[in-house]
Amino acid sequence: MGENPVTVEVTQLRSVADRVMAAADRLAELRFPGPDPDDLRGSKASGIAAPDLVVARLEDVVANMRGWAVAARMSADAFELAEQRNAGRFDRP
């Protein structure tokens, strides 16, 4: 059975995590204006919740991006620590 060694470039992983976190921060700053309720008073469109749904979904996306970035950083730290602790135990090609 052949081996498929896996390598992780922790520097690159951290860099991607930083970029994802920065993108999440930029998304979190976006504001979606909703319709002015006074302009829609009496119309069927006055009860539309679409802007609220967009904001809620965007908050979910931002939270998931931030969560991924934190998990990626933690993984990079764990890989690095495992490498430091076990570097001499395994033969390298």
Image (cartoon, grey):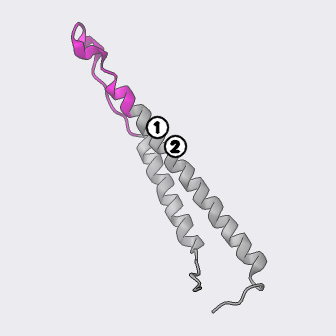
Quarter of the rendering containing residue 45: top left
> Label 2 near label 1: C-beta < 8 Å?
yes
Graded by Cα atoms within 10 Å as few (under 14), some (14 to 19) or many (20 or more), the crowding at tag 2 reads some
Residue 49 lies in the magenta stretch: yes
Judge whether 32 appears above or below 62 on screen: above
Q: Residue 39 carries which label?
A: none
Choose top left, top right, bottom left or bottom right for residue 31: top left
Q: Label 2: which residue?
A: 63
Q: Position of residue 44 (x, y in %)?
A: 23, 13
Q: What residue type is labelled 2?
A: Ala
Please indicate whether residue 1 sits to the left or right of residue 41 in the image: right
Element type at marker 2? Answer: helix
Who's the residue at 52% across and 59% down the image? 18
Q: Which residue lies furthest to the top in this view?
A: 42
Give the residues drawn in magenta, as a range: 30-54
Determine the residue located farthest toward the front in the rendered image.
Answer: 1
Horizontal arrangement in the rendering, residue 51 relative to residue 56 (left or right): left
- Horizontally, residue 3 falls left or right of residue 90, namely left
Quick check: 48 above or below 7? above
Q: What residue type is labelled 1?
A: Glu
Figure check: 36 above or below 72: above
* Screen quadrant of the N terminus: bottom right
Q: Mark 1 points at which residue?
A: 59
